[in-house]
Image (cartoon, rainbow, N blue to C red):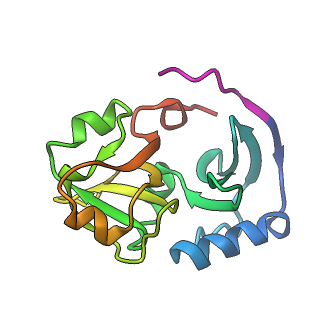
Amino acid sequence: MVKDWVVKKRRPVRRKNIAPLLKDLETHLGADLAVDGAFLEMAQYGPWNLVLVDRVALAFETEKPDGERCVSLTLRGLLAKPIDKMYVDVDHGAIPFLMNGADCMVAGVHAADPDIEIDDLVWIRDKEHGRPLAIGWAKMTGKEMVESGKGKGITNIHHVGDELWSMEL
């Protein structure tokens, strides 16, 4: 599914202007972007507010399905700053489907952060290498994803190869 999103309202910002977003990233994911001395920008991309660090989209802010504000790293951000929270490990059989933007079915899930709750923003990684593959909304708790044998576990919103991944700024 091709999205007609374009980057809008791109503007340079100071660290103090995005400090709350950075604090939320550290609280939620334990991720420190270490942006001191970097060229920082904000931009709007579809429903997301992107944080660009040295012209690379490393984080985004969006709303949960219930309307609550949520902050996460993009897949490029996860590659740059590996974290070990809010993850779901999948086997190699799920990778081709995720790369095409499909939702993550629990049949391919092998492990998950037990702190994951329904409607949390989670990232999906390859169980062998730990490389990020997709980001999406959890439809089950982490424990349910591992124990359940069927059903949709995560609704995919960003995956390797999509428009955000391929964006050149």
Q: Identify which residue is drawn at 32% across, 35% down.
A: 99
**Is 76 within the magenta?**
no
Does residue 90 appear left or right of residue 58 in this picture?
A: left
Q: Identify which residue is drawn at 75% across, 40% down.
A: 44
Residue 4 vertical position relative to residue 61 in the rendered view, above or below: above
Quadrant position of residue 38: bottom right
Task: Tell me the chief SS of the magenta region.
Answer: loop
Q: Which residues are magenta?
A: 1-8
Residue 103 vertical position relative to residue 39 in the rendered view, above or below: above
Q: Nearer the viewer, residue 62 or 12?
A: 62
Does residue 161 appear left or right of residue 8 in this picture?
A: left
Residue 4 vertical position relative to residue 84 in the rendered view, above or below: above
**Is 2 within the magenta?**
yes
The x and y percentages for residue 47 are 69, 40
Q: Is residue 134 visible?
A: no
Q: Identify which residue is drawn at 48% across, 50% down.
A: 76
The x and y percentages for residue 102 are 35, 35
The x and y percentages for residue 164 are 54, 36
Quadrant position of residue 129: bottom left
Q: Nearer the viewer, residue 84 or 98?
A: 98
The x and y percentages for residue 112 are 30, 68
